[in-house]
Image (cartoon, rainbow, N blue to C red):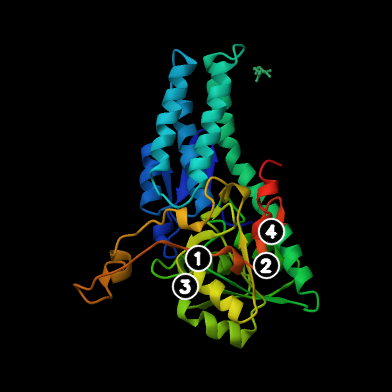
């Protein structure tokens, strides 16, 4: 069965699957401009670090296709930069949108300097660059899946089939398709190497039970849902072979910001002698940031903790703390960081920066 497609883009028309309505209904909503994308990202109709960068950039492509050619390349580039700066403000922790914006601004500068490129051609080049992100991300994820599955299989050579624990959603719903951590799990399954995947509920917003469980059931991958509080017991009882998670931002030393609850899984994995892997495109690595302490951590609305849908589930008046992410120190990432360029120990990332 084809993997779930959550971002649909055709000839300047962009639609995304509204993830807030999952798993009850599968409804696609149109994204007609950058403002629509910003709101959909902020409200988490689309989430996941690679997916929000792609939806943001594609929404700009939609606008550029409708835009009458500006008078000058400078004017065109000012327009593009303004829109990108705005998109970057939608959510602070993931680095992908910022890096995509920087790459696009660099392209604008190159096109502006190139006297053999006129304004119309420059606009076409920028659109092509933005539209390529969708296919590029799927290709990267397939490579991440292959590298990860090979590494995990090699390190567990005596075992016929593996038991994997994952957290949050890193699949087709978090990327352009296939997924990062869930892509590795898909690749293990395809290679007939997966016994069972355990997915956490991922409180407070339940991306695991709503989204990952939805994808796993959809593709008939053998899976079991556990609450976040059951992770230690599950590692012990089911003899988990590896934990694989995604990343919102990896610092230069390998410290990794990911969905809240990732850090506790890494600590538990160490106690149970379970390999701990991070799977992410190379573009999630922020070489500007030396370590995890400088990664900004978004605080989310308290209503995510106090309510399920519109039903209050916590005592009225209680104070809440709701960080969206936590930082896992590099030394706990014992399996490695799985990227499209290969699997690296956290301290081996830097030499591969510009390859
Ligand atoms: C300038 O643009 C032309 C036409 O697209 C291209 O062939 C050439 O390589 C560009 N020059 C530079 C320096 O990028």
Ligand 1's quadrant? top right
Evaluate whether residue 190 shows in this view: no
Judged from the image, the secondary structure of the residue bearing numbered disc 1 is loop
Check whether the beta carbons of the residues at disc 1 and disc 4 lie within 8 A of each other: no
Check whether the beta carbons of the residues at disc 2 and disc 3 lie within 8 A of each other: no
Q: Earlier in the sequence, mark 2 or mark 1?
A: 1
Q: In the rendering, at what x and y percent does residue 73 appear?
A: 49, 17
Which residue position holds label 3?
201
Q: Nearer the viewer, mark 2 or mark 1?
A: 2
Q: Earlier in the sequence, mark 4 or mark 2?
A: 4
Q: CA distance from mark 4 to mark 2?
A: 15 Å
Which residue position holds label 1?
168
Q: CA distance from mark 1 to mark 3?
A: 7 Å
Q: Nearer the viewer, mark 2 or mark 3?
A: 2
Q: Residue at x 28, y 75 (%)?
A: 313
Is 288 in front, or is 344? Answer: 288
Is disc 2 surrounded by few (<14), some (14 to 19) or many (20+) residues within 10 Å?
Answer: many
Task: Give the residue at the far left of this rendering.
Answer: 317
Where is 95 relative to 223, above or below? above
Is 232 in front, or is 202? Answer: 232
Q: CA distance from mark 4 to mark 3?
A: 23 Å
Judged from the image, the secondary structure of the residue bearing numbered disc 3 is loop
Judged from the image, the secondary structure of the residue bearing numbered disc 2 is loop
Which quadrant holds the N terminus? bottom right
Which residue position holds label 4?
145
Residue 206 falls in image quadrant: bottom left
Q: In the rendering, at what x and y percent does residue 268 appear?
A: 55, 78
Is 261 in front, or is 138? Answer: 261
Q: Residue at x 54, y 18 (%)?
A: 112
Which residue position holds label 2?
335
């Amino acid at each position: 069965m084809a993997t779930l497609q959550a971002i649909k883009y055709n000839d300047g028309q962009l639609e995304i699957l509204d993830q807030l309505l999952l798993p009850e209904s599968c409804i696609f909503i149109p994204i007609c401009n950058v403002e629509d994308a910003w709101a959909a990202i902020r409200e988490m109709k689309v989430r996941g670090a690679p997916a929000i960068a792609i939806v943001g950039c594609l929404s700009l492509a939609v606008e550029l296709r409708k835009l009458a050619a500006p008078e000058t390349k400078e004017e065109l580039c000012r327009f593009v930069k303004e829109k990108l700066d705005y998109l970057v403000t939608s959510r602070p922790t993931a680095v992908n949108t910022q890096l995509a914006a920087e790459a696009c601004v660099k392209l604008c500068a190159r096109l502006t300097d190139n006297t053999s490129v006129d304004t119309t051609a420059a606009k076409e080049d920028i659109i092509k660059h933005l539209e390529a992100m969708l296919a590029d991300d799927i290709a990267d994820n397939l490579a991440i899946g292959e590298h990860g599955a090979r590494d995990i299989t090699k390190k567990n050579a005596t075992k016929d089939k593996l038991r994997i624990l994952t957290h949050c959603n890193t699949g087709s719903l978090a990327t352009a398709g296939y997924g990062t951590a869930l892509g590795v799990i898909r690749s293990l399954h395809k290679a007939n190497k997966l016994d069972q995947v355990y997915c956490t509920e991922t409180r407070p917003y339940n991306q695991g039970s709503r989204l990952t469980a939805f994808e796993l059931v959809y593709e008939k991958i053998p899976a079991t849902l556990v609450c976040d509080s059951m992770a230690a017991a599950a590692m012990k009882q089911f003899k988990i072979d590896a934990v694989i998670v995604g990343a919102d931002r990896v610092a230069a030393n390998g410290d990794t910001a990911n969905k809240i609850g990732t850090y506790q899984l890494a600590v538990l994995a160490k106690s149970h002698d379970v390999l701990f892997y991070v799977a992410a495109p190379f573009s999630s690595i922020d070489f500007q940031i030396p370590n995890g302490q400088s990664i900004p951590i978004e605080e989310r609305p308290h209503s995510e903790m106090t309510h399920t849908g519109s039903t209050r589930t916590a005592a009225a008046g209680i104070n809440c703390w709701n960080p969206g992410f936590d930082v896992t120190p590099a030394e706990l990432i014992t399996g490695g960081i799985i990227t499209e360029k290969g699997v690296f120990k956290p301290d081996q990332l830097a030499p591969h920066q510009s390859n």
